[in-house]
């Protein structure tokens, strides 16, 4: 096989071919270099750099963190792991009894203060946001975790999506998240200002692979999470001068009530491991190397995100087709399970 040098020597008489080859070589070198730099940065972010020190956000100095969707799953883990790092916690979610139980557990385990604010984010009632403000306006809050979210009960074609489910997803994932941020971000800004440079603020919002990749049969959820990507990135630009770091956290599946997956695996961590990676990776991009103020922190999710982005691409026809087939098959299995459960219930009734 001729070497590159020999190839170049073969075409010196034809400048067009010569310069095309030089240009192609330079583009190739540039592409390879940027790919290697991004991949190296992913490896360093995910496996090498030591965990973020939350003293930066006021840990162990009487500061508070607000966590939404805090009574279960990923939100409950955020609450526990932030309490362990030395923050008092405001827990927000729907069910008062669950919030009370979590608050009690946190106070007993970490000897830290807690407050609870029960409300149904699907109602989008201004009274909810006023009640939240009334409970927290005088607390030195530095962290907000926008975790509350809802997905479809099972994958469903958009045209068959129940209108209540559609409204709830958009209201909880988008309207409530934005209104809660409007209530809490000014309090974080005031706390940061009072700390005279000693503490920064942090707003993390839960994104999803559903928002990273357009996801047929989860179209409303997918759109709502993609909305959060743009909103959170825009907010990151606005609030940086106020001393507040804003980040979207992207995740593939995690075991939880929402995912309906109970057993963890290499690509599906439990909430504890996922949240540990998210807090360790604040300020780093993990698998989201192409995105500003965004992190895909869990190591297998990071490799998946990077792999898709650097091969077929998140907006490709192929990714869309594969996603469609996967969710069609999940829907079919879910419908069969529903039918079996219904048959079981009616047999029980007959007995
Ligand atoms: N699990 C995954 O595979 C996965 C993957 C990617 C992204 N995410 C995102 O991660 C976030 C948390 O998901 P998760 O799996 O931890 O969910 P989860 O286990 O179902 O927990 C949801 C939490 O949100 C609260 N909540 C639900 N509906 C509410 C409402 N209408 N008003 C107020 N609070 C409400 C729940 O409170 P109650 O218990 O009182 O109902 C609960 O505390 C979501 O934003 C989700 O989109 C999850």
Image (cartoon, helix red, strand yellow):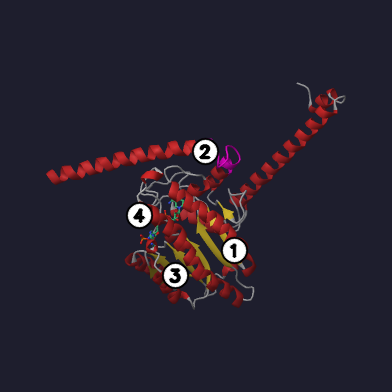
Residue found farthest to the top: 1
Which stretch did the figure color magenta?
306-319
Q: Position of residue 178 (x, y in %)?
A: 49, 63
Q: Which mark is residue 319?
A: 2
Which one is closest to the eye, mark 1 or mark 2?
A: 2
Reading the chain from its start, which is encountered first: label 1 or label 4?
A: 4
Reading the chain from its start, which is encountered first: label 3 or label 1?
A: 3
Dot 3 and dot 1 residues touching (CB under 8 Å): no
Mark 2 Cβ and ligand 1 under 8 Å apart: no
Mark 2 lies on a secondary structure that is helix
| Ligand 1 located in image quadrant | bottom left
Reading the chain from its start, which is encountered first: label 4 or label 3?
A: 3
Image position of 304 (left or right of 263) = right
C-alpha gap between disc 3 and disc 1: 19 Å
Q: Position of residue 184 (x, y in %)?
A: 50, 70
Is residue 199 within the magenta segment?
no
């Amino acid at each position: 096989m001729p070497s590159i040098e020999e190839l170049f020597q073969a075409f010196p008489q034809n400048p067009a071919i010569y310069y095309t080859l030089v240009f192609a070589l330079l583009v190739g070198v540039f592409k390879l270099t940027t790919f290697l730099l991004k991949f190296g940065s992913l490896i360093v972010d995910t496996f090498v750099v030591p965990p973020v020190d939350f003293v930066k956000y006021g840990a162990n100095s009487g500061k508070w963190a607000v966590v939404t969707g805090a009574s279960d799953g990923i939100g409950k883990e955020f609450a526990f792991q932030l309490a362990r790092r030395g923050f008092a916690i405001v827990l927000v979610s729907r069910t008062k009894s669950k919030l009370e139980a979590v608050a009690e557990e946190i106070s007993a385990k970490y000897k830290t203060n807690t407050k609870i604010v029960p409300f149904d984010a699907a109602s989008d009632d201004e009274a909810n946001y006023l009640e939240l403000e009334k409970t927290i306006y005088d607390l030195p809050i530095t962290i907000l975790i926008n975790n509350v979210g809802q997905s479809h009960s099972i994958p469903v074609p958009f045209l068959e999506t129940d209108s209540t489910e559609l409204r709830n997803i958009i209201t909880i994932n988008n309207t409530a998240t934005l209104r809660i941020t409007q209530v809490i971000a000014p309090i974080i800004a005031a706390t940061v200002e009072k700390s005279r440079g000693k503490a920064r603020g942090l707003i993390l919002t839960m994104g999803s692979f559903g928002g990273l990749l357009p996801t047929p049969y989860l179209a409303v959820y997918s759109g709502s999470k993609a909305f959060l990507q743009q909103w959170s990135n825009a907010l990151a630009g606005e609030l940086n001068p106020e001393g507040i770091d804003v980040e979207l956290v992207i995740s593939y599946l995690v075991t939880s009530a929402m995912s309906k997956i109970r057993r963890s695996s290499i690509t599906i961590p439990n909430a504890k491991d996922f949240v540990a990676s998210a807090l360790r990776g604040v300020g780093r991009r993990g698998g989201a190397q192409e995105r500003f103020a965004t992190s895909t922190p869990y190591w297998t999710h990071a490799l998946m995100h990077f792999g898709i982005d650097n091969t077929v691409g998140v907006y490709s026809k192929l990714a869309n087709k594969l996603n469609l087939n996967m969710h069609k098959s999940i829907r079919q299995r879910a419908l069969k399970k529903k039918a079996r459960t219904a048959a079981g219930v009616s047999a029980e009734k007959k007995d």
